[in-house]
Image (cartoon, rainbow, N blue to C red):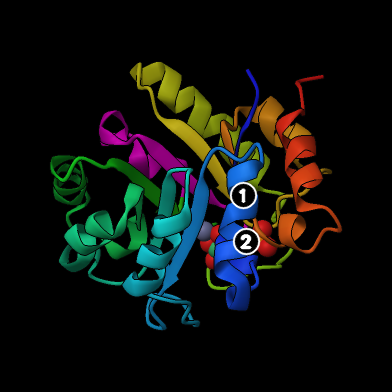
Amino acid sequence: MSLLIAPSILAADFSNLQREVEMLNTSAADYIHVDIMDGVFVPNISFGIPVIEAIQRHAQKPLDVHLMIVNPDNYLEAFKNAGAAVISVHYEACTHLHRTLQAIHSLGAKAGVAINPHTPVELLSDVIQDVDLVCMMSVNPGFGGQKFIENTYSKVSRLKDLILAKGAATKIEIDGGVNLDNAPKLLAAGADVLVAGSFVFNSADPIQTINQLKSIEVV
Ligand code: DX5
Ligand code: ZN
């Protein structure tokens, strides 16, 4: 099975957002990854709901919305209404994670859980059957263009084992520092979806770069 690719719009040229979204529409991308940062959960602020609505007006790919915010429950409906197909909340920001996942599902969206690099995958053991997607951070969240953390491979393998042991259908998404060097190893370890921001948008030919990521096979 080939990887699903989710280019992160955080690395796009915001002054030409429509053009960037239309470029992704013509590419082999499977999702558009949308990073929401509140300046509290992470030390950076990205953009908010009106910008997601603007992306959604032009997007022909489902929006994979990654909420790096505190109190995500207060905004789930707003993000769904803005066009989110997948809503990922951070494990570290949810006191009642099970309740939050139920709320996302009741809105008709796919429910994702993002985990920081220090958060063990085993903490998801009792909730994994309710999770459509684990967004595993392979950098500390808050910024694009950071260096991939090597410990991620072992976390992916352990999460894959957990998903299989529980008979869950959860997909594993890797977010941060993804490139053509680490992507084959991530696929081999059990990753299903790769987020790629700067590697795609800073390349000379983003469409070709997405194709290259998409055509990686297990060796
Ligand atoms: C980091 C964001 C990532 C980021 C990835 O906080 O969650 O989605 O946009 O960017 P790159 O691929 O440049 O590391
Ligand atoms: Zn992200």
The answer to whether the residue bearing label 2 lies less than 8 angstroms from the nearest atom of ligand 1 is no
Query: Residue at image x 66%, y 42%?
Result: 27
Q: CA distance from mark 1 to mark 2?
A: 6 Å
- Above or below, 83 against 18 in this view is above
The answer to whether the residue bearing label 1 lies less than 8 angstroms from the nearest atom of ligand 1 is no
- Above or below, 180 against 70 in this view is above
Q: Callout 1, which amino acid?
A: Leu
The residue lying toward the viewer, choosing from 204 and 195, is 204
Q: Are marks 1 and 2 in contact (CB under 8 Å)?
A: yes
- Above or below, 71 against 61 in this view is below
The residue lying toward the viewer, choosing from 180 and 206, is 206
- On the question of residue 118 being in view, the answer is no
Q: Which residue is mark 1?
A: 24
Image: magenta residue range: 120-139
Figure disc tally = 2
Which numbered disc covers residue 20? 2
Disc 2: CA contacts within 10 A as few (<14), some (14-19) or many (>=20): some
Q: Judge left or right: residue 162 versus residue 70.
A: right
Element marked by disc 2: helix
Residue 181, horizontal then vertical, whole percent: 84, 43
- Above or below, 188 against 67 in this view is above
Residue 115, horizontal then vertical, whole percent: 44, 53
